Image (spheres, rainbow, N blue to C red):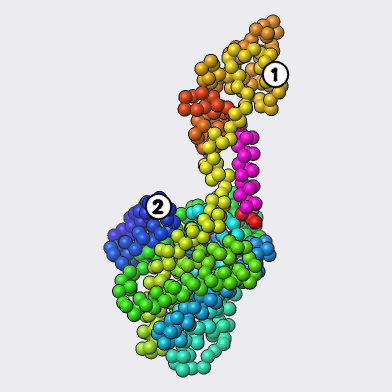
């Protein structure tokens, strides 16, 4: 099948699938993964093999974008204010998940090295799925901030644990002496190299961006650097997510305002890539691994132990640092997802153990199957749990722009019902008093049926004053100017603003379903209303 046709069809069907699931109040990412499951190796076998391999560069590029956007949330001010609780929760949930899985898997398999390896992998959290839900529901607040920080740092913790246990496991199978350098030094060195690569790339971008004035060119340039950084990370065998996070974090702290705008634009542009990315993840999951009873027992044990470790580890870390109650209570439920990092570690250990003989080969295959199966489960249940966590913490819908907010507010909520309305038979002197007593400079004129027939503004008054002899006889209908623009009280503020921008209007009369004028509003009204709302949401999110 033609790859471009398949990609286009996948994005189209993925969009529909995501919206269908969203209609049932399920995060869209679940719809993407389910679509991938249907067309992938579990059922239809359309999206697999060479097609998946050919799309791997695009998938890696998407991971790089996700990593950069996550990193852009890691501002120094956040860690200065909340660093203690973030680190406490990170280590508590990571170590407790590691220990819980290690103990229960060791008990079932009677092999300590299997327990340790799966425990280390269990400490990792998939940033892509978690962030997708946070973006979809426009979440902002202490729980969201903690989740974002932890999933950005989880990779580093998982790499350190993995480095220790993978070397230890090989020595157990081969009966060799344990090497601290290979177990601890190599993972720490890799983390340092990732941070260095990301930071140097960001410093280069900051220097260049000072000489580029066009926003579109800056966005294109940064996308190019992200792509090159992902490629260089893979060439140097470094974790591309970590290096991308370092790039985003450095950018956010050196160019806070510009990076926020640019990464916001990149995030919006990359929606088709996100859809394709999660469909590809679903396509690689194999539902048939659940048919093996022995394997199923290990899978269930892993899931239960990891879940308990994440939830109670978060609670323990929050209690130690006396974090907010909602952070302590709900953050753990946003850490269930597991994806690319876990699968990467599983593939890596499979490669390492395959060279240790028959026992190592069997252990490697078991680990891959367990991680693949548990990834399948948590990628389905994880996103709804993230949604539940931010909803319970009342943080959904708080990371909104002015445009987002205006789409939720009706014109009827903002109009000034006391806005003076002039009738056609109103005398000129009365009209002059209205102009004198009211702060507005333009007023609608209505007939006896309450329908708008025109407007009176400053120019209308000036023209009427030129008619000195007949000024006392003038009425509203004599000095009004033609005006045919109105907006329904059931329209949103965004629709009203768009309408006013199109016709260059400073104010607009508001009518009901019978076209009767209810009042008016001008730009100052909605700007003040929206600014106040945004400020309130910002204050609530920053508490």
* Callout 1 crowding tier (Cα within 10 Å): few <14, some 14–19, many ≥20: few
Q: Which mark is residue 102?
A: none
Q: Quadrant of residue 84?
A: bottom right
Tell me which residue sits at (59%, 49%) in the image: 214
**Count of marks, rendered view:** 2
Question: Image check: 225 left or right of 524?
Answer: left
Residue nearest the viewer, comparing 366 with 317: 317
Question: Image check: 77 left or right of 181?
Answer: right
State the extent of the magenta-drawn residues as a range: 521-540
* Callout 2 crowding tier (Cα within 10 Å): few <14, some 14–19, many ≥20: few
Give the position of the N terminus as an image quadrant: bottom left
Indicate whether residue 522 is drawn in magenta: yes
Tell me which residue sits at (46%, 54%) in the image: 271
x then y, percent, for residue 113: 46, 86
Q: Of helix, strand and loop, which one carries label 1?
A: helix
x then y, percent, for residue 394: 55, 54
Q: Is residue 104 above or below residue 342?
A: below
x then y, percent, for residue 103: 47, 82
Q: Earlier in the sequence, mark 1 or mark 2?
A: 2
x then y, percent, for residue 123: 51, 74
Question: Image check: 100 left or right of 256?
Answer: left
Q: Which residue is mark 2?
A: 24
How far is disc 1 from disc 2 in space, using C-alphas? 56 Å
Q: Of helix, strand and loop, which one carries label 2?
A: loop
Q: Which residue is mark 1?
A: 433
Q: Is residue 535 above or below residue 68?
A: above
């Amino acid at each position: 099948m033609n790859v471009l046709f398949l990609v286009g069809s996948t994005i189209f069907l993925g969009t529909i699938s995501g919206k269908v699931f969203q209609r049932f109040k399920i995060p869209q990412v679940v719809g993407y993964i389910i679509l991938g499951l249907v067309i992938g190796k579990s059922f239809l076998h359309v999206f697999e093999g060479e097609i998946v391999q050919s799309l791997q560069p695009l998938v890696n590029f998407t991971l790089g974008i996700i990593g950069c956007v996550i990193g852009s949330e890691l501002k120094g001010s956040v860690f200065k204010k909340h660093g203690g609780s973030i680190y406490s929760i990170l280590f508590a949930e990571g170590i407790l998940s590691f220990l819980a899985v290690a103990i229960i898997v060791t008990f079932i398999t009677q092999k300590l090295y299997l327990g340790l390896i799966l425990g280390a992998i269990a400490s990792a959290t998939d940033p892509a799925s978690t962030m997708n839900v946070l973006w979809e529901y426009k979440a902002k607040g202490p729980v969201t901030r903690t989740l974002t920080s932890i999933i950005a740092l989880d990779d580093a913790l998982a790499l350190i644990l993995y480095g220790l246990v993978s070397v230890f496991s090989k020595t157990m199978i081969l009966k060799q002496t344990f090497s601290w350098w290979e177990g601890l030094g190599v993972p720490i060195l890799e983390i340092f190299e990732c941070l260095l690569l990301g930071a140097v790339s960001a410093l280069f971008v900051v220097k260049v961006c000072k000489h580029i004035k066009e926003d579109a060119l800056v966005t294109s340039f940064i996308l190019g650097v992200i792509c090159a950084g992902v490629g260089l990370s893979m060439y140097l065998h470094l974790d591309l997510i970590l290096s991308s996070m370092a790039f985003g974090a450095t950018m956010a702290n050196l160019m806070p305002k510009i990076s926020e705008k640019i990464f916001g634009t990149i995030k919006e542009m990359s929606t088709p890539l996100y859809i394709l990315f999660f469909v590809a993840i679903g396509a690689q999951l194999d539902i048939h691994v659940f048919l093996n009873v022995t394997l199923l027992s290990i899978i269930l044990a892993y899931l239960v132990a990891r879940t308990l470790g994440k939830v109670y580890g978060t609670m323990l870390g929050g209690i130690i640092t006396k974090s907010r109650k909602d952070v302590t209570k709900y953050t753990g439920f946003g850490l269930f997802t597991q994806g690319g990092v876990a699968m990467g570690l599983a593939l890596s250990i499979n490669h390492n153990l395959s060279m240790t003989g028959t026992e190592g080969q069997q252990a490697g295959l078991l680990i891959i199957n367990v991680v693949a199966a548990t990834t399948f489960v948590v990628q389905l249940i994880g996103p709804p749990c993230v949604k539940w966590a931010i909803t319970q913490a009342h943080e959904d819908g708080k990371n909104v722009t002015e445009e987002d907010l205006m789409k939720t507010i009706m014109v009827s909520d903002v109009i000034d019902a006391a806005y003076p309305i002039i009738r056609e038979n109103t005398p000129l002197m009365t009209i002059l008093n209205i102009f004198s007593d009211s702060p507005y400079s333009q007023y609608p004129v209505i007939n006896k049926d309450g329908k708008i027939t025109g407007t009176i503004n400053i120019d209308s008054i000036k023209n009427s004053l030129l008619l000195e002899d007949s000024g006392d006889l003038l009425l509203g209908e004599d000095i009004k100017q033609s005006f045919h623009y109105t907006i329904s009280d059931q329209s949103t503020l965004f629709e009203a603003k768009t309408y006013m921008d199109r016709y260059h209007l400073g104010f607009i009369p508001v009518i009901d379903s019978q076209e009767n004028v209810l009042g008016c509003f001008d730009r100052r009204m909605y700007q003040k209303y929206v600014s106040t709302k945004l400020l309130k949401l910002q204050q609530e999110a920053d508490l």
